[in-house]
Image (cartoon, helix red, strand yellow):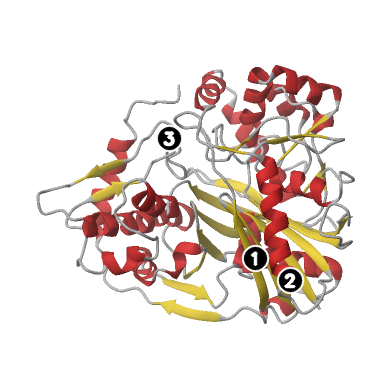
């Protein structure tokens, strides 16, 4: 038996066919276009995401030995999507999680005294990162489209909801608690949409999707819409919670970091809602069909792997992202150069949407190798900031995954900075793997979480060595400077 897992990420869609022993039988991948219409704005065309999904799934299935038993889905979170309930066409572009256009709106709500109540209900902060302010912006600036939302003709959701609507031919308008808990509209205690928050942001509750458990019967793919296949959709989760599940972090205190476009550190909290005083978020990790919820503490870092992409595409310092390790190894350290990659503001634990990227310590002796090494160090410093806020620095092991985790130098710097072991699994596609695990549990491919834990295999363990605390202190000073940069988003 096998499972088709769809990972609809920020820059592309990955599809995996995963066998019942947890191995990847085949894979497909398709990028889609990014739109940057104004400084601080990031948009996607939802149709591009759907077409990339079809392409990636077609490629993966064409290389598989048989038809999968079920489908699991994971997705970029917080991105706001609207679509026509009848035609499934999107009347406007999606506003991506990275988008900062609502910084001013969030600031005004904060100044009006709403943040304590919003945080109490949601475990989140008033920040442009989350979905609700994006929807409020669409209501204000896309009045004709929003009229359809008010009348019930246009659906509101996140990427998971949109793709499930497309997969089912419009029969299902659903989301799961892991995605819902990232919208600023979901109550952690109540486990449902909060009318008080819907009113605050001007989002009609009837337009929002039904919240269903993370695994179990969710719907069926419509053959005429999805490659001629009628398969049960039996698992769904936001990408970071899916990675936590894919890393088999099932015990309280288990911690993982996904090194992708941004980096996301999650710690399993079990069934307890724990509030952070250190700028971290409380979120739903997953919910069982019986209704039992597991929570997680999360530190969201907006730009890590994207900083390496910027070195490649923006500055032309490297030809491919994979060159970064070899080039960084040609110098023993960054030569005093510090890079704060606040290219879309700063996330946890600083939460400053107005911060901007900053490079300090440049001399006549600075080379591109120093800047590349400073970028890798910045990723490790950002993760250290979050882990120390989350655990007080007492994490025994960090499970690492995501594209940038293949960089051995970065993983070693990370272990050094944390003073803790970093474990990298044999399968790097843990986000998609988490979607497969959830769907397989929901459809009976696996019988229990202990069955899933047996499939996890260690590829390499990075043991901490000497820690450069002086470099970390320079980093902290540079973050302060970046946080006092004037805003360009208003």
Q: Is residue 254 above or below residue 35?
A: below
- Residue found at x 26% / y 71%: 466
Tell me, yes or no, whether the two marked residues, 3 and 2, touch with CB atoms within 8 Å.
no
- Residue 77, given in percent of the width and then of the height, sits at 63, 46
- Residue 12, given in percent of the width and then of the height, sits at 59, 53
Tell me, yes or no, whether the two marked residues, 2 and 1, touch with CB atoms within 8 Å.
yes
For residue 237, say whether it is visible: no
- Residue 291, given in percent of the width and then of the height, sits at 83, 55
Mark 3–mark 1 Cα distance, whole angstroms, equals 37 Å
User: Does dot 2 land on a helix, a strand or a loop?
Assistant: helix
The residue labelled by disc 2 is: 62
- Residue found at x 78% / y 28%: 195
* Eye-nearest disc, 3 or 2: 2
Q: Residues within 10 Å of mark 3 (few under 14, many from 20)?
A: some
Answer with left or right where residue 220 lies relative to residue 125: right
The residue labelled by disc 1 is: 28
Tell me, yes or no, whether the two marked residues, 3 and 1, touch with CB atoms within 8 Å.
no
Mark 3–mark 2 Cα distance, whole angstroms, equals 45 Å
Q: Is residue 248 above or below residue 95?
A: below
The residue labelled by disc 3 is: 352
- Residue found at x 52% / y 46%: 280
Residue positioned most to the left: 364
């Amino acid at each position: 038996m096998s499972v088709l897992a769809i990972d609809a990420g920020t820059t592309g869609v990955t599809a995996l066919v995963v066998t019942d022993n947890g191995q990847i039988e085949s894979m497909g991948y398709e990028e889609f276009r990014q739109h940057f219409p104004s400084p601080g704005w990031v948009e996607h065309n939802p149709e591009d995401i759907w077409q990339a999904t079809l392409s990636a799934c077609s490629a993966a299935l064409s290389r598989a030995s048989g038809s999968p038993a079920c489908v699991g889905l994971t997705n970029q979170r917080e991105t706001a999507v609207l679509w026509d309930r009848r035609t499934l066409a999107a009347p406007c572009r999606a506003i991506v999680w990275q988008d900062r256009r609502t910084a001013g709106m969030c600031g005004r709500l904060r100044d009006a005294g709403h943040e304590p109540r919003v945080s109490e209900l949601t475990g989140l902060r008033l920040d442009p990162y989350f979905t609700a302010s994006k929807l409020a912006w669409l209501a204000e600036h896309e009045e004709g489209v929003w009229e359809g939302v008010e009348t019930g003709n246009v659906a509101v959701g996140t990427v998971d909801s949109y793709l499930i609507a497309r997969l089912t031919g419009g029969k299902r308008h659903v989301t799961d608690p892991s995605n819902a808990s990232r919208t600023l509209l979901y109550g952690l205690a109540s486990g449902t949409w909060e009318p008080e928050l819907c009113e605050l942001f001007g989002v009609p509750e009837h337009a929002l999707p039904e919240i269903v458990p993370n695994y179990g019967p969710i719907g069926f793919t419509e053959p005429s819409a999805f490659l001629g296949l009628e398969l049960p959709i039996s698992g769904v989760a936001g990408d970071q919670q899916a990675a936590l599940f894919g890393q088999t972090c099932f015990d309280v205190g288990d911690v993982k970091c996904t090194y992708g476009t941004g980096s996301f550190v999650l710690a399993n909290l079990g069934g307890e809602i724990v509030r952070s005083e250190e700028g971290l978020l409380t979120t739903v990790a997953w919910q069982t069909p019986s209704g039992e919820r597991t929570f997680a503490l999360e530190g969201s870092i907006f730009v890590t792997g994207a900083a390496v992409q910027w070195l490649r595409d923006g500055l032309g310092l490297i030809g491919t992202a994979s060159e970064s390790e070899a080039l960084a190894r040609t110098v023993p350290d960054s030569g005093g150069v510090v890079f704060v990659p606040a290219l879309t503001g700063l996330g946890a634990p600083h939460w400053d949407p107005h911060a901007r990227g900053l490079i300090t310590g440049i001399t006549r002796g600075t080379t591109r190798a120093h800047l590349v090494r400073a970028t890798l160090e910045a990723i490790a410093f950002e993760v250290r900031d979050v882990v120390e806020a989350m655990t007080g620095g007492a994490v025994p092991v960090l499970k690492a995954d995501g594209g940038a985790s293949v960089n051995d130098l970065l993983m070693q710097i990370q272990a050094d900075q944390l003073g803790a072991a970093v474990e990298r699994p044999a399968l790097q596609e843990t986000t998609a793997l988490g979607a497969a695990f959830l769907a397989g549990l929901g459809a009976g491919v696996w019988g229990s979480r202990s069955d899933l834990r047996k499939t996890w295999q260690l590829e390499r363990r990075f043991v901490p060595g000497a820690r450069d605390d002086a470099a970390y202190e320079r980093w902290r000073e540079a973050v302060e400077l970046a946080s006092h940069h004037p805003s360009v988003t208003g």
